[in-house]
Amino acid sequence: MENAVADQQPTKAEVRGGLIAYLQVDGAFKVAEFYQRAFGAEQAFAYPPDEKGRTMHVHLYINGTSLMMSDAFPEHGYPHQEPKAFTLQLVVDDIDSWWNRAVDAGCEIVTPLQVMFWGDRYGQLRDPFGISWAMNAPVKAE
């Protein structure tokens, strides 16, 4: 894994953004690899996997912001729970290319892209891990 040292001391990855989502997922490395394909994520840091293939921390950059995640560790009181009651939102300029890349990678369309009542193009997707994503882009005046 990139940026991890043998003694598991992290290198300092820059935290980008003022509010960072931290996801607990089932298969953090698998999720991170999918986000690279679907959302152009770059891995900033990851702890090496344990003997079960889990990691306690992955730090990604997506659209200029940090997104962090870890695997569930039920033996330490953190069992995996299905994601619910939140949506990660990407505010982008070229919504069609972001949308098409995510759909081509395997995201399911929940709300098709459309101009919404507030005047922006918006749509919602669900990734194969159950996480909801929304995309929003201002409609450019002709």
Image (tube, rainbow, N blue to C red):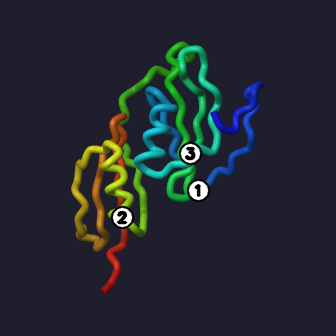
Q: Is residue 39 left or right of residue 5?
A: left
Give residue 131's position: percent from left, percent from top.
Answer: 37, 40
Residue drawn where x is 24% and y is 49% of the image: 109
Q: Quadrant of residue 26?
A: top left
| Marks 2/3: CA–CA distance | 20 Å
SS at mark 1? loop
Badge nearest the viewer, 2 or 1: 2
What's the residue at 53%, 46% (across, down)? 67
Q: Amino acid at mark 3?
A: Leu
Task: Report the amino acid beneath label 1.
Answer: Gly
Please determine whether, in this image, residue 71 is positioned above or below residue 123. Answer: above
Q: Percent x, y for residue 23? A: 48, 37
Which numbered disc, 3 or 1, marks the residue that appears first in the sequence? 1
The answer to whether the residues at label 2 and label 1 have Cβ atoms under 8 Å apart is no
Q: Is residue 84 visible?
A: no
Please say whether residue 140 is visible from this viewpoint: yes
* Residue name at image x 51 percent, y 32 percent: 29
* Residue 9, image quadrant: top right
Between 72 and 11, which is closer to the camera in this rendering? 11
Which quarter of the figure is the C terminus placed in?
bottom left
> N-terminal of the two: label 2 or label 1?
1
Looking at the figure, which quarter contains the N terminus?
Answer: top right
* Residue 58 at x, y percent in the picture: 58, 36
Camera-near label (3 vs 1) is 3
Q: Which residue is mark 3?
A: 60
Residue under circle 2? 95
Q: Is residue 84 left or right of residue 49?
A: left
Looking at the image, which residue is at 35% across and 50% down? 102
Q: Which residue is mark 1?
A: 17
